[in-house]
Amino acid sequence: MWAIEIAHNHNWNNSWLETDSMLLPLAFKNSIMILWALRNKWLNCIEVTKRKNFIASHIYREENICADGLANLGLMSNGFLWWQNVPNNIRKEVVKNMLGMPNYRFTTF
């Protein structure tokens, strides 16, 4: 809901919200899933997204190196984070992503 509110407050008319939780796309299909204490705020967010070019999708975080890096920053944080520029810890991965370069992850058994 914060992401939708931030996009709305910045007048961003084109937004794509990716999440590693299946609950977000399901909540867009069925608002009853949202706790009653948050439901009014959620329904307001739904109305905001209807007036914009908005997509919400599920990704597997471990397959998206940039999202994984941001999630790790969030885990180390004590509060809300906002960056005007790409954080240094994911800058290399963002550039690779923009250039269409593949990411590989090797594991050992």
Image (cartoon, rainbow, N blue to C red):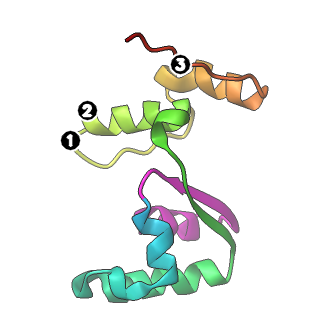
Residue flagged by tag 1: what amino acid is it?
Answer: Asn
Residue identified by numbered label 1? 78
Q: Nearer the viewer, mark 2 or mark 3?
A: 3
Residue 96 placement, left or right of 63: right
Residue 49 position within the rendered picture, expressed as x and y whole percent measured from the top left:
60, 77
Q: Is residue 11 visible?
A: no
Q: In the rendered view of the protein, which quadrant contains the N terminus?
A: bottom left
Residue 12 position within the rendered picture, expressed as x and y whole percent measured from the top left:
66, 64
Q: Nearer the viewer, mark 3 or mark 1?
A: 3
- Work out whether 63 lies above or below 2: above
Q: Is residue 89 visible?
A: yes
Residue 35 placement, left or right of 18: left
Residue identified by numbered label 3? 105
- Work out whether 81 lies above or below 8: above
Q: Is residue 6 magenta?
A: yes
99 and 57: which is toward the camera: 57
At mark 3, the secondary structure is loop
Q: Is residue 19 magenta?
A: yes
**For the residues marked 3 and 1, what is the alpha-carbon distance in whole angstroms?**
29 Å
- Res 75 quadrant in image: top left
Magenta segment boundaries in residue numbering:
1-21
- Work out whether 27 lies above or below 93: below
Residue count near mark 1 (Cα–Cα under 10 Å), binned few <14, some 14–19, many ≥20: few
**For the residues marked 2 and 3, what is the alpha-carbon distance in whole angstroms?**
23 Å
Residue 107 position within the rendered picture, expressed as x and y whole percent measured from the top left:
44, 14
**Mark 3 vs 1, N-terminal side:** 1
Question: Residue at the right extreme?
Answer: 99
